[in-house]
Amino acid sequence: MHKVGLIIKREYTTRVSNKRFILTTFLIPVVFILFIAGSVYFATSSKEQLTIAVVNDPGFLQSNLKSDTGNVTFSFTEDVDSLNYKAKKIDAILYTTSVNGTLVSNLHSEKQIGFEATKYIERQLNKAVENNMLQESGINKTTLDSISNASEDNVTLTNMVEDGKGKSKEANTGIAYAIGFGSGFLIYMTMFIFGAMVMRGVAEEKTNRIAEVIVSSCKPFELMLGKIIGIAGVGLTQLLLWILLMIVLTSSLSMFIPAETYQQFQQAQQGQDVLNTATGNPMAMKILQAKSDFIEGVNWFMVIGCFLFYFLGGYLFYASLFAAIGSVINEDPQEAQALMLPITMPIIFSFVILNSVLSNPGSNLAVWTSIIPFTSPIIMMGRIPFGVPGTVPYWQLAASMLSLIGGFMLTTWLAGKIYRTGILMYGKKVTWKEMITWTFRKN
């Protein structure tokens, strides 16, 4: 074990002191936040600005067809046709006619109108037809809208779930979905990134003949185990630093919120005021409410504890397999990709079905894929934020953890037998069939 400890120390210190590690650790959270902010900005600022000329109005569109955004403007002019509309700075012509009570519309333009703008025009036409039908039936649209709005304001639905202690608490499906997806995505990325790091490290040592020198003083299995655990420490260090940075960024939101607004929010939380009628900065109040729901609506002890377990368990389960692949490949990248495919397919499959699992975390698909060790690191972490022992009974969590531990022991044992043979083999392309035969070979 002393030799394994030395290998772990070497792997950890070499990679943590690397400039690339330091840059990625502090830049990735910043890039992630900038990516989200940029996506939101471009999604809201890059919408089409269109002027639509309405031709052949059947008689009710001009009074009912309205634009409630600044992106699409409807123009009712009679002197517009397909020959002069571009000169009048009109983007498209909407030809309308009524056939047997049905509004038939055709949109004529020089270039194709975007999907979002097309659906918006269609919705506005539907509203115009609806308003016209209400008017013809003698129904007051304003009265109908007021009744509809009042009924929505007078109905509230709160999902209360049991906490396993004879009590109930309010469930927040949106927050659970976000945490489940974020946790699953993070584990998905780390298994790929750090698994590939193990494979590259083993392959580089084999190519540079460093492995021959190290193996002369320790067993191949000790070398593989030390490398896996050392890189696991690197990944855990990076993860903890990311969590710390996110806590700092979340806490710093309060610095940009006026003290008066923060005090109003505290009063609303204590029942001294009503949040919806509180004066002040509405956006700041929403941020405070979202922050409060995010912190108080989740069993963070359970989520963080399970995340660390599945983060390490999933990594250790797959890292040994990646190490085995690294020990048999030479310098051909295509050879590495071909051998990696059977290992990466379960990881990709887990991420593909994650959205379905989050939509129905109690389904048979969710239960069984959260227990099978090939898929459990991603799937179980997607289910846990929805509640333990509510959505995830204790027996399912225990079965998932035990199967992952057993799977790690099995894959490490099998990968060790492949590693022992492959690390000293040069110039020969190895297939999965050959590697499987190595696992049944006696020592």
Image (tube, rainbow, N blue to C red):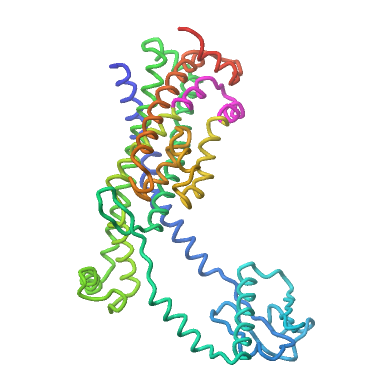
Q: Which residues are magenta?
A: 320-340
Split into 4 quadrants, where in the image is the N terminus?
top left
- Quadrant in the rendering for residue 94: bottom right
- 8, above or below 87, in the image: above
Find the residue positioned furthest to the right. Answer: 83
The spot of residue 88 in percent (x, y) is 70, 85
Split into 4 quadrants, where in the image is the C terminus?
top left
Find the residue positioned furthest to the front. Answer: 166
In the visual, does 308 lie left or right of 54?
left
The spot of residue 197 in percent (x, y) is 45, 32
Is residue 173 magenta-colored? no
Q: Residue at x 43, y 29 (%)?
A: 317
Q: Residue at x 36, y 49 (%)?
A: 385
Find the residue positioned furthest to the top. Answer: 443
The spot of residue 426 in percent (x, y) is 55, 14
Q: Nearer the viewer, residue 310 or 370?
A: 370
In the visual, does 58 lie left or right of 162?
right
In the visual, does 207 lie left or right of 82?
left
- 29, above or below 290, in the image: above
Magenta segment main secondary structure: helix
- 199, above or below 380, in the image: above
The spot of residue 356 in percent (x, y) is 51, 49
